Image (spheres, rainbow, N blue to C red):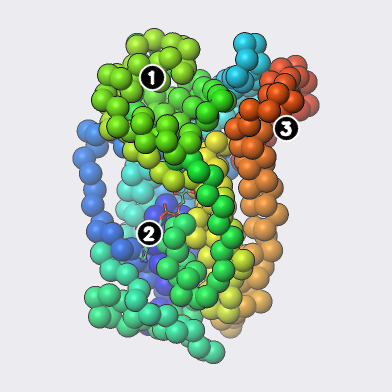
């Protein structure tokens, strides 16, 4: 089988690239190791994302945002970030920033469903699920991939969108700098006694960062990034005990909580591939870089990668080869600084707050109090949150 671009990994980032290439004149194959299953709308997905306005604009431009049911979208109109001493907090609102919302909270599978439906409607895009590459050979004119189902593919460009443990990256021999945080992100959804009032709440605590993010109705989604041992204990708790633990950690702000999805834990790491492009090869999303989820920016970075790569490929000349290294380097150059800045910011915050030294504790809490009063600094933080 021949195509121009093969995207390995149909997660949110890979599928957003496929949708972003619609109309580019390129024939695309998007494949994923997992089967394409559509769970019922009645359940809630415990994997949720804070989608920045920049990312929602991209998803709208590629025709996917319109496919997300409005009743599954929650707008965040304000944020409250609490430190680990009384009164250390920062609050910002969309109103102050002159925006309708700071971000949207959406379930992972609702975005996935919308992206895959968008892609399936296009003749220029072929999809293959429940199959994975087993061999990669990059040549002068094309790259060859053997699939686990026995098929062979010749493509001009191979894109690795296959997540943090990227097979494509490893098969291309690209080194990766990996620094595990020794933490897991524990996620679960709750029904709340009190209304969340479209406020995203975060508590920076001695042993991690707890976020309760608004979902439609009286529901919130929890992301609790904490040390491995506590994460393991949280996941093992029964529903009532976990709810009590989260009520206490969140100072009972939302009243009584009732667990509505089982808790799951994801390992957290800082990670960066030593190269994001090679001749006939590009990495996007978590395959290229991972950040701590405390700022909720991982998939947003990935969407910006996909947009940048799609733009570079769409702007190529009619005779240009989409796997040309010079073309691909334009994509890497466009992304290196924004990713570096976000990795440094989230890593710095993680270190500042997961440290018990007195000086640092004073600094972070004083920093939150001061930032809350200084308008330009607050505006800067809001701009970062808006992506
Ligand atoms: C607890 C937690 C909370 C988070 N919250 C946020 C948030 O609020 N906002 C945000 O922006 N980010 C958040 N993130 C980060 C976000 O989850 C990732 O950045 C995002 O999922 C990366 O998407 P991706 O498509 O690059 O990779 P993935 O989501 O990992 O998708 C990779 C895809 O590739 C497929 N695949 C893997 N290997 C192969 C193979 N060999 N062959 C074929 N297919 C393969 C997989 O099946 C999968 O479909 C969070 C992360 C964690 C851990």
Residue displayed at 39% across by 28% down: 221
Any part of residue 342 in sight = no
Q: Is residue 154 visible?
A: yes
248 or 304: nearer the viewer: 248
Q: Is mark 3 within 8 Å of ligand 1?
A: no
CB atoms at circles 2 and 3 under 8 Å apart? no
Quarter of image, res 87: top right
Report the quarter where the C terminus lies.
top right
Task: Give the SS element for disc 1.
Answer: helix
Is the C-beta separation of discs 1 and 3 under 8 Å? no
- Element on which disc 2 rests: loop
Residue 225 to residue 243: above or below? below
**Residue 362, percent from left and from top:** 72, 21
**Residue holding disc 2:** 10
Gap in angstroms between the C-alphas marked 1 and 2? 36 Å
- The image position of residue 35, as x and y in percent, is 24, 59
Q: Position of residue 58 (x, y in %)?
A: 53, 48
2 or 3: tag closer to the N-terminus: 2
State left or right for residue 141 relative to residue 355: left
Would you place residue 58 above or below residue 35 in this image?
A: above
Label 3 element class: helix
Q: Is residue 151 rendered to the left or right of residue 305?
A: left
Q: Is mark 2 within 8 Å of ligand 1?
A: yes
N-terminal label among 1 and 2: 2
> Which residue corresponds to mark 3?
380
Q: Against 308, is 106 above or below? A: above
Residue nearest the observer in this picture, 141 or 234: 234
Which image quarter: residue 4? Answer: bottom left
Q: Residue at 35% of width from left, 11% of height from top? A: 256
Look at discs 1 and 2 and give the one toward the viewer: 1
């Amino acid at each position: 089988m021949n195509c121009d671009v093969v995207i390995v990994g149909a997660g949110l980032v890979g599928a957003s690239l496929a949708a972003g290439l619609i109309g580019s004149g390129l024939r695309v194959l998007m494949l994923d190791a997992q089967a394409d299953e559509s769970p019922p709308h009645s359940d809630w997905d415990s994997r949720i994302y804070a989608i920045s306005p920049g990312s929602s604009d991209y998803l709208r431009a590629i025709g996917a945002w319109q496919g997300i049911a409005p009743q599954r979208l929650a707008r965040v109109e304000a944020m409250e970030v609490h430190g680990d001493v009384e009164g250390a907090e920062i609050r910002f609102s969309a109103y102050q920033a002159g925006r309708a919302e700071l971000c949207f909270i959406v379930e992972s599978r609702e975005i996935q469903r919308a992206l895959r439906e968008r892609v399936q409607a296009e003749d220029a895009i072929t999809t293959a699920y429940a199959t994975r590459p087993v061999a990669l050979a990059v040549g002068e004119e094309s790259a060859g991939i053997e699939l686990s189902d026995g098929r062979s593919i010749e493509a001009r460009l191979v894109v690795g969108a296959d997540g943090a443990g990227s097979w494509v990256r490893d098969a291309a021999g690209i080194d990766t700098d990996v620094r595990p945080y020794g933490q897991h992100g524990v996620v679960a959804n709750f029904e709340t006694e009190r209304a969340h009032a479209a406020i995203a709440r975060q508590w920076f605590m001695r042993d991690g960062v707890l976020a309760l993010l608004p979902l439609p109705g009286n529901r919130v989604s929890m992301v609790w990034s904490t040390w491995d041992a506590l994460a393991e204990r949280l996941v093992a708790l029964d529903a009532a005990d976990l709810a009590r633990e989260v009520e206490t950690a969140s100072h009972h702000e939302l009243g009584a909580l009732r667990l509505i999805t089982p808790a799951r834990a994801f390992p957290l790491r800082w990670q960066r591939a030593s190269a994001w492009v090679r001749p006939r090869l590009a990495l996007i999303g978590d395959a290229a870089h991972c950040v701590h989820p405390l700022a909720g920016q991982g998939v947003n970075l990935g969407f910006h990668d996909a947009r940048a790569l799609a733009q570079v490929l769409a702007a190529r000349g009619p005779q240009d080869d989409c796997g040309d290294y010079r073309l691909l380097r334009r994509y890497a150059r466009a992304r290196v600084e924004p990713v570096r800045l976000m990795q440094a910011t989230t890593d710095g915050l993680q270190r500042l707050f997961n440290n018990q030294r007195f000086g640092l504790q004073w600094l972070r809490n004083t920093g939150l109090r001061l930032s809350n009063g200084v308008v330009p600094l607050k505006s800067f933080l809001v701009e970062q949150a808006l992506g």
